[in-house]
Amino acid sequence: TVQLAYKCHLARRIARRLRELRVMLPRILAKQRRLAAAEALQRAWRCRLARDRARGEAGGRLLARLLRAAANLRYRVLLAARGLQAAARTRMVRHRVRRKLAHDTLVAAARCALLRGAYRRKAAADGVAARALRAIYSAGYRRKVAADTLRAGVRMVCIHRRYARHIAGVNLGAYAARRPHRRALERAWAAGLRVQSAWRGHA
């Protein structure tokens, strides 16, 4: 009886589940159809995006090649123009430098001639003035040397006399300062000898 009741219970549950599945099956199928349609639309959209991207990349590569070719052509034209400008500028600068060098050479030659003449005249005048000044200086120097020699001789005699007097005074003072000390040393030495002889028994 228990097994029969359990089997009836299982049968009722299975029947109820089958009724629920029968009701839910159209909904599940409709949902699957909607999902399949959405997936198909998404796949088609992805294919379209990939196709557009491939076309864009191809067009971008072509456009990049065209732009690179145009830039290369423009750069070559610019380089050619720059080369022509540099050549013309170099030619103009070279001619200008040559004219400037020629002018500077002429000016330098004229200036050297003027300076050479002025230097010769200045050297002659300086030679005459130098000989005159040398004669004047030599005469004055001789007189000054003679006067300095006499003055130095008198000064040395005076210094020698003062030094001799100073040395004599120093020697006398030192001798006078040494005599009391020497006498005290002699007295102490004699006293020591007397003490030593008395200790040895000579006295």
Image (cartoon, rainbow, N blue to C red):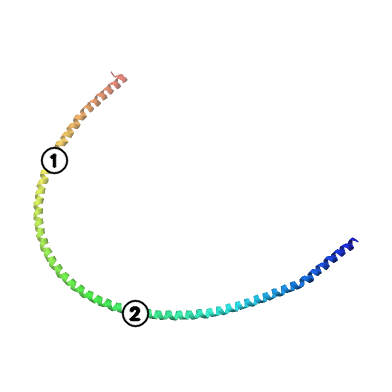
* Quarter of the N terminus within the rendering: bottom right
> In the shown orientation, is residue 104 left or right of residue 12?
left
Residue 45: quadrant of the picture: bottom right
* Kind of residue at badge 1: His
Residue at 84%, 66% in the rendered image: 12
User: Which residue is nearer to you in this view: 151 or 184?
Assistant: 151
* Quarter of the C terminus within the rendering: top left
Residue 186: quadrant of the picture: top left
Residue 16: quadrant of the picture: bottom right
Q: Callout 1 environment at 10 Å: few (<14), some (14 to 19), or many (20+)? A: few
> In the shown orientation, is residue 93 left or right of residue 39?
left
> In the shown orientation, is residue 27 left or right of residue 122?
right
The picture places residue 141, in percent across and down from the top left corner, at 10, 53
Residue 162 versus residue 77 in the image, above or below? above
Q: Is mark 2 on a helix, strand or loop?
A: helix
Q: Is mark 1 on a helix, strand or loop?
A: helix
Which residue matches tag 2? 87
Which residue matches tag 1? 160
- Between circles 2 and 1, the one closer to the viewer is 2
The picture places residue 24, in percent across and down from the top left corner, at 76, 70
The picture places residue 109, in percent across and down from the top left corner, at 19, 73
The picture places residue 181, in percent across and down from the top left corner, at 23, 28
